[in-house]
Amino acid sequence: MDRSIQRLLLAGGLIVSLAMGIRHGFGFFMPPMTSAFGWTRESFAFALGMQNLIWGLAQPFAGALADRHGPGKVLLGGGLLYALGLLLMTVSATPVLFSLSAGVLLGLALSGTTYSVIFGVLGRTVPAAYRSRAMGLTAAAGSFGQFAMVPIERSLIDGMGWLPSLLVLAGCALLMLPLGRSLTRQADAMPQTGAPQVHAHLLQGMLHTFARAWTEKGFRLLMAGYFVCGFQVVFIGVHLPAYLRDHGMGGNIASLALALIGLFNIFGTFIFGEAGSRYAKPPLLAGIYLARSIAIGLFLLLPLSVPSVLVFASVMGFLWLSTVPLTNGVIASQFGVQHLGMLSGAVFFSHQLGSFLGVWLGGKLYDLNGNYNIVWGIAIALGVLAALANLPIREQASAAFADKAAA
């Protein structure tokens, strides 16, 4: 890769690293905030579930706007909303207000600062031979953010309390603004591969593009698999600290577990991004989903201990966001890069539906049963189904997009 691509990857990677890293530690705010406001776990979990749902709903629009007008304004708006949402979390004293700040505002913010927008830029500027690698490196940067921010957020909460910690994180979110400007300058200076078909109305164009993609069975199966991905990772990411606390383990173990997820996520996203450049992506995706179900099953069957938690976190981390470069690579192979931001956002919406159900059901079923057993079982079963869904997918160009697919 030449230096212009490297600079583009650096700016995009840092944006994703901040956006994904900050939200990865939200599970640590559950105990102090529910205690301070007298909420149930479901109330907290519902807000984070709403965040994932809004993120998914807004992502196709954010991707389509970036496809059509460039990423600059989308990233600017996303960064400002991120900081505002974190600030308002400090004064959200009721579950409704918390759902608006942590749920709606942060969901909108994430739609403008994460993968669909950044991958849309990469898809149009990075040559096809390096595309999967570039997406893998960017996803790895997001993983590094998760690894780096977990101990920082835990230390902030322990040292300052949850409210000042949110103020510090809001300041960190504002760093995405200059990074977004840098990314836009780099992308504008590079040759572009294709351009989206412009419709008079944005929504009309989005519906037309999605309708063409929906005719492909592989696209529908990809959405089904990504639904499972969201269910599994967000349930574990939010509820694992509380699950470990329920079993007598301190917050330091939960912090280490989430940090290990972020650390091994770096390796997983990079390795699977590289593998996607050399091998068929759908079988790799099937293997990831099946391996997750096996890992969860063994975690539950074996006696719970510090070593078992750390091994589970490491394995799940390796499989955590490894689906991201592969899934987006399949979309680019099937439909080209002209509408990559929008179609990636549409598939991501399915991911976020799963995320909403995973985090909300975790809180709801815990409040009903006093444990997470049913949700763990659902996560295992869905992983097996996702593996079966990905196996029939083929990467050849869609007939509906054949005249526009990238080489």
Image (cartoon, rainbow, N blue to C red):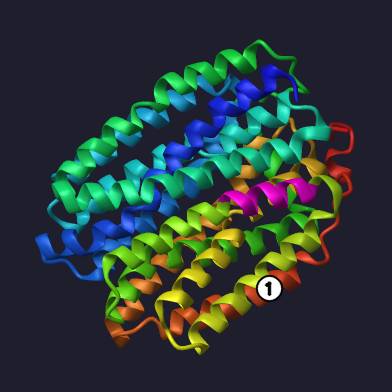
Looking at the image, the residue that sits furthest to the front is 307
Residue 384 falls in image quadrant: bottom right
Image quarter hosting the C terminus: top right
Which segment did they paint magenta? 266-276
Residue 247 falls in image quadrant: bottom left
**Which amino acid type corresponds to the residue marked 1 in the rendered image?**
Leu
Residue 71 at x, y percent in the picture: 55, 24
The rendered magenta stretch, by its main secondary structure, is classed as: helix
Q: Is residue 285 left or right of residue 63?
A: right
State whether residue 196 appears in this view.
no
Instruction: Give the residue at mark 1.
Output: 290
Q: Which residue is drawn at the image coordinates 70% and 34% (left, top)? A: 339
Placement of 396 over or under 290, stated as above or below: above
Residue 136 at x, y percent in the picture: 67, 43
Q: Is residue 110 magenta?
A: no
Q: Nearer the viewer, residue 212 or 130?
A: 130
Placement of 68 over or under 291, stated as above or below: above
Q: Secondary structure at mark 1?
A: helix
Q: Which residue is drawn at the image coordinates 51% and 17% (left, top)? A: 182
